[in-house]
Image (cartoon, grey):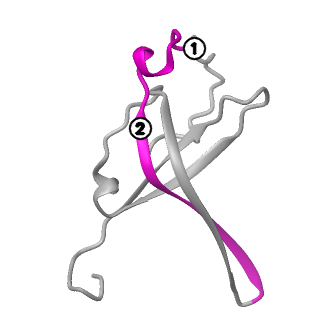
Amino acid sequence: MGKSGKEWKRGGFVMATEAEYSNDVALDLWGKMADMKLQEGQRVKASIDVSSREHEGRWYTQAKAWKVEVLTDETTGSAPPPPAPDMGNDDFDLF
């Protein structure tokens, strides 16, 4: 519960960048954004804030998405990329 008495929701997803050497990035969603339903394989554009904090001598970093746009062929102007090969790694499911 927040200070205002409203319940806070938290969710998130993992996305892969489209860089030459792709990185997986876990993004947190808060409030109304936590209700966003994404499908595995959907292309999205995320606007994020990255922050770090220190606690008992250790540093923790959080990437929080404040805007997520689901991309379509019309918004990108190109065909979607081919599906990624199955590498047998299920560690990065939506949560």
Q: Is residue 74 above or below residue 46?
A: above
**Residue 36 lies within the magenta run:** no
Is 14 left or right of 12, judged from the image as shown?
A: right
Crowd rating for badge 2 (residues with CA inside 10 Å; few <14, some 14–19, many 20+): few
Between residues 35 and 86, which one lies in front from this camera angle?
35
- Give the residue at mark 2: 69
Q: Amino acid at mark 1?
A: Pro
Residue 95 visible to an observer of this rendering: no
Crowd rating for badge 1 (residues with CA inside 10 Å; few <14, some 14–19, many 20+): few
Assign the N terminus to one quadrant of the image: bottom left
Looking at the rendering, which quadrant does residue 5 occupy?
A: bottom left
Q: Provide residue 52's location: percent of width, then percent of height.
A: 67, 73
Between residues 53 and 79, which one lies in front from this camera angle?
79
Q: Provide residue 28's location: percent of width, then percent of height.
A: 48, 58
Looking at the rendering, which quadrant does residue 83 occupy?
A: top right
* Mark 2 secondary-structure assignment: strand
Which residue corresponds to the image point at 30% horizontal and 72% vertical from the top-left? 8
Looking at the rendering, which quadrant does residue 70 occupy?
A: top left
* Mark 1 secondary-structure assignment: loop
Q: Amino acid at mark 2?
A: Glu
Disc 1 to disc 2, C-alpha distance: 17 Å
The part of the chain drawn in magenta is 57-80
Q: Is residue 45 above or below residue 25?
A: above
Q: Provide residue 22's location: percent of width, then percent of height.
A: 72, 32
Residue 64 visible to an observer of this rendering: yes
Q: Provide residue 76's location: percent of width, then percent of height.
A: 50, 20
Which residue corresponds to the image point at 34% horizontal and 55% vertical from the top-left? 34
Q: Is residue 12 above or below residue 57?
A: above
- Give the residue at mark 1: 81
Which residue corresponds to the image point at 33% horizontal and 54% vertical from the top-left? 33
> Is label 1 or label 2 in front?
2
